């Protein structure tokens, strides 16, 4: 049977490559994360079989069950493929930090307070793990958005210097929704400049997690290294 997601994934990959080339970047610099929240395990498996290795979940409880089911089904264990990498992209409450560490996310995109950083550090230390993470930055004043204020990025980075088990490797952000993706550009550019400013202070931040189904091409033109794409891969009616 034909893979139901192959065509969507091929289209998204082509658009990623074209956007990268337009910006004078190499397509390999951009990692496609398929956002699999609310998507049943069979379809996650189909995406894996169509070549996707990175998946994003936004709820700890849902992620836990799904990761377990998929690991038991053998996903990510094909010898010729890199292992599946799970990304946590939702708001993380401190009381779920231990569970998040335990699930083995490759990258947690949403560190948004010193308190959360401290709890993650304590849990990672206890588990004997080194956890990669990003700082979520609040790019607009919408009440539904989480993240540290742009002015708080460097102080959170400084706080993390004493955290031996959490490695902050970049910034994540979400512009407000605009039907016209081009309008999101200044928000992506702002996140890129915030990274530059932090790097000028001596922090090493290779990653920018920005861009979703309707605006990822603009995000890539502005420097995204990780794009988080749900609808354009899995469809609208989930
Ligand atoms: C759902 C979600 C996405 C994917 O959104 P689409 O518009 O479906 O591509 C990306 N990032 C976060 C944080 C999300 O919650």
Image (tube, rainbow, N blue to C red):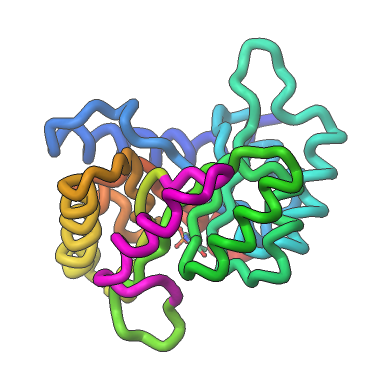
The residue sitting at 48% across, 43% down in the picture is 167
| Screen quadrant of the N terminus | top right
Choose between 89 and 7: the one closer to the eye: 89
Q: Is residue 141 visible?
A: yes
- Please identify the residue farthest to the bottom as the structure is shown: 143
Residue 149 part of the magenta-drawn span: yes
Q: Quadrant of residue 211?
A: bottom left
In the image, taking residue 150 as reference, residue 46 lies left or right, namely right
Q: Is residue 218 visible?
A: no
The residue sitting at 38% across, 51% down in the picture is 209
Q: Quadrant of residue 131?
A: top right
Q: Which residues are magenta?
A: 146-168
Choose between 107 and 164: the one closer to the eye: 164
| Screen quadrant of the C terminus | bottom right
- Picture coordinates of residue 23, whole percent (x, y): 13, 38
- Picture coordinates of residue 6, whole percent (x, y): 54, 34
Q: Quadrant of residue 188?
A: bottom left
Residue 161 part of the magenta-drawn span: yes
- Picture coordinates of residue 75, whole percent (x, y): 75, 30
Number of numbered markers: 0
- Picture coordinates of residue 83, whole percent (x, y): 64, 25
The residue sitting at 67% across, 39% down in the picture is 129
The residue sitting at 21% across, 58% down in the picture is 194
In the image, taking residue 185 as reference, residue 1 lies left or right, namely right
- Please identify the residue farthest to the top as the structure is shown: 80
- Residue 220, compared with residue 38, is above or below; it is above
């Amino acid at each position: 049977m034909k893979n139901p997601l192959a065509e969507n994934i091929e289209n998204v990959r082509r658009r990623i490559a074209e956007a990268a080339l337009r910006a004078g970047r190499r397509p390999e610099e951009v990692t496609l994360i398929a956002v699999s929240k609310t998507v049943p395990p069979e379809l996650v498996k189909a995406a894996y079989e169509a070549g996707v290795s990175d998946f994003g979940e936004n709820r700890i409880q849902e992620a836990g069950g799904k990761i377990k089911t998929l690991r038991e089904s053998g996903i990510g264990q094909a010898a010729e493929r890199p292992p599946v990498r799970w990304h946590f992209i939702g708001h993380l409450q401190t009381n779920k930090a231990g569970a998040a560490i335990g699930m083995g996310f490759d990258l947690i995109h949403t560190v948004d307070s010193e308190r959360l950083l401290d709890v993650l550090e304590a849990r990672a230390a206890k588990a004997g793990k080194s956890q990669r993470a990003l700082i979520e930055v609040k790019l607009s004043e919408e009440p539904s958005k989480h993240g540290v204020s742009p002015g708080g990025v460097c102080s959170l980075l400084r706080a993390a210097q004493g955290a031996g088990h959490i490695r902050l490797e970049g910034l994540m952000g979400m512009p407000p929704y605009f039907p016209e993706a081009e309008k999101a550009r200044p928000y992506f550019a702002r996140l890129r400049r915030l990274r530059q400013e932090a790097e000028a202070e001596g922090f090493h931040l290779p990653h920018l997690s920005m861009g979703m189904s309707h605006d990822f091409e603009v995000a890539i033109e502005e420097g995204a290294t990780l794009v988080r794409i749900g609808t354009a891969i899995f469809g609208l009616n989930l």
